[in-house]
Image: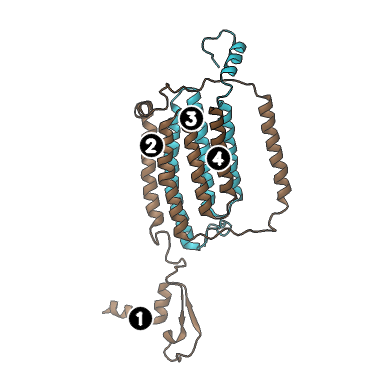
Amino acid sequence: MLALLFLLFAALAVGCALAMVAQRNPLYSAISLIGVFVSLACLYIMLAAPFIAAVQVIVYEGAIMPGVVFVIMLLNVEVEERRTGRLKFLVPAAVVLAFVLFAEVAFILASMQEFYVTPASASANVGVTHSIGTALFTQYLLPFEITSILLLMAIVGAMTLARRGGLLSPNARVIPGAQQLPLSIVDASVGIEDTRAVETDTTDEAARLLGYERLRDESERE
Amino acid sequence: MKQRGCSDTSACAMSQSENNEMEPQLSWYLALSAVLFTIGVTGVIIKRNIIAMFMCIELMLNSVNLTFVAFSSFFQDVTGQLFVFIVMTVAAAEAAVGLGIIIAIFRNRESLDVDEASILKL
């Protein structure tokens, strides 16, 4: 009975993982990955680790995957297009190497000595919250504190990365400053029917072309 | 392995194999974990979308978690589950920073294709 359940969840996990890799739309990949996480949580429950299963559902399905889905929908990700003709000569090599890998695994499985370990019974208190909390706050307190520092660094790093313009130097290509101006704006002697364009790369350059630089210098002089 | 209450190891293994005929063995979980990890590595190699590569890394982390929990449960030791807890925390931190990097890359390049970001500068 337990073996059937294991096979069911294992097949679900492997199938969802394969679907995740095979999908070209990132949103479908994310949904398949959620399937993998759910089946892994079921396997954790089978392994008598209910706390880890709950944390898996809360952290992965509740925190990480919504973030990923938010980013996918926010960025309007295009479907990955199929590219052919590149590195095509590597496909036979990949097939041969995959067979070598499977042969190695089969050899190891065939020559492996069977050993049996008593699985955790339901009465064992290894995976319950009490034992995990006791060990976490007594014997493994230092890794716990280091983890908290890591989380603080992650918060600061995410805020630094997500701040608009935080990483750009003044010489970088700035999207709002890079523009094409009609020549008639820069030079008043050209008629408005002149459709030639002036390209500027930065905001400072555009200000200089438009004459604001001169005005600003004069105002500073006053 | 130290077998409890068995003087003869082979006979004990035989009896235990009869008992555990229909129960999942430790090697089953390890094999599943290896399969999931291989799928994750393959995904990181063949995917070009940076978000898909990110999700494949998450899959690899989860397969390692499965190994930890399986060993922890079969050897009756709580240390493995503590490591899983810490791995999950690291994965959450990685998700926060990684998604920030993805947004920054998209803002600068307007594309998520890793082949276009291969020289790491604009």
- Residue A161 got which mark? none
Work out whether mark 1 precedes mark 4 in sequence or the reverse, and give the earlier one: 4
Q: Residue at x 55, y 9 (%)?
A: B6
Estimate the spatial distance between the alpha carbons at disc 1 and disc 2, rounded to whole Å.
Answer: 55 Å
Q: Decide: few, some or many residues near mark 2? Use Cα within 10 Å; few <14, some 14-19, many ≥20.
A: few
Q: Position of residue B91 (x, y in %)?
A: 45, 42
Estimate the spatial distance between the alpha carbons at disc 3 and disc 1, rounded to whole Å.
Answer: 75 Å
- Circles 3 and 2: CB distance less than 8 Å? no
Quarter of the image for residue B15 reads top right
Residue identifier under label 3: A46
Name the tint of chain A in the rendering.
Answer: brown
Work out whether mark 3 precedes mark 1 in sequence or the reverse, and give the earlier one: 3
On the same chain, marks 3 and 4? The answer is yes
Q: Position of residue A181 (x, y in %)?
A: 45, 80
Viewer-closest of B106 and A71: A71
Q: Residue furthest front?
A: A1
Give the residue type at disc 2.
Ile
Viewer-closest of A5 and A135: A5
